[in-house]
Amino acid sequence: MSDVIPPAVFVSLGLVAWVPTIELTINIRNMPQSKWLRFYTRTRFITCGLLETDGETWDDDRLVLISRQIAQVRIQK
């Protein structure tokens, strides 16, 4: 479920970028108890065509998982 949501970089670049994953690390902290979860993702830097996206998934006030994705940014022209 962590890799299903659109990359955070789409907010600034729009859907004109292709973001293939190079590495994805997911650390599960708790099992979800409800059927509704909140996702937060953020990308702070895009350098040399690479980005990292940090993600959090929450179930009410419990942290369910954290993730980090290293990806390449390819802007379609």
Image: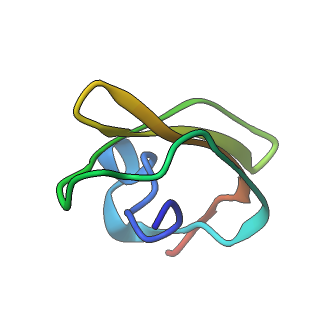
Residue 1 vs 50, above or below: the answer is: below
Judge left or right: residue 67 versus residue 9: right
Identify whether 68 is placed above or below 32: above
Looking at the rendering, which quadrant does residue 59 occupy?
Answer: top left
Using the image, determine if residue 28 lies above or below residue 4: above
Q: Nearer the viewer, residue 49 or 19?
A: 19
**As drawn, is 49 to the left or to the right of 66?**
right
Percent x, y for residue 1?
45, 67
For the rendered model, the colour scheme is rainbow
Residue 60 location, x and y as percent? 22, 33
Picture coordinates of residue 58 (x, y %)? 35, 37
Residue at the image position 38 percent from the left and 63 percent from the top? 5
The image quadrant of residue 6 is bottom left
Q: Nearer the viewer, residue 3 or 53?
A: 3
Q: How many marks?
A: 0
**Front one among 77 and 25:** 25
Decide: is 13 above or below 53. Answer: below
Q: Residue at x 30, y 51 (%)?
A: 33
Residue at horizontal 67%, vertical 72%? 20
Taking the image as shown, residue 29 lies to the left or right of residue 38, namely right
Residue 16: x and y in percent read: 40, 69
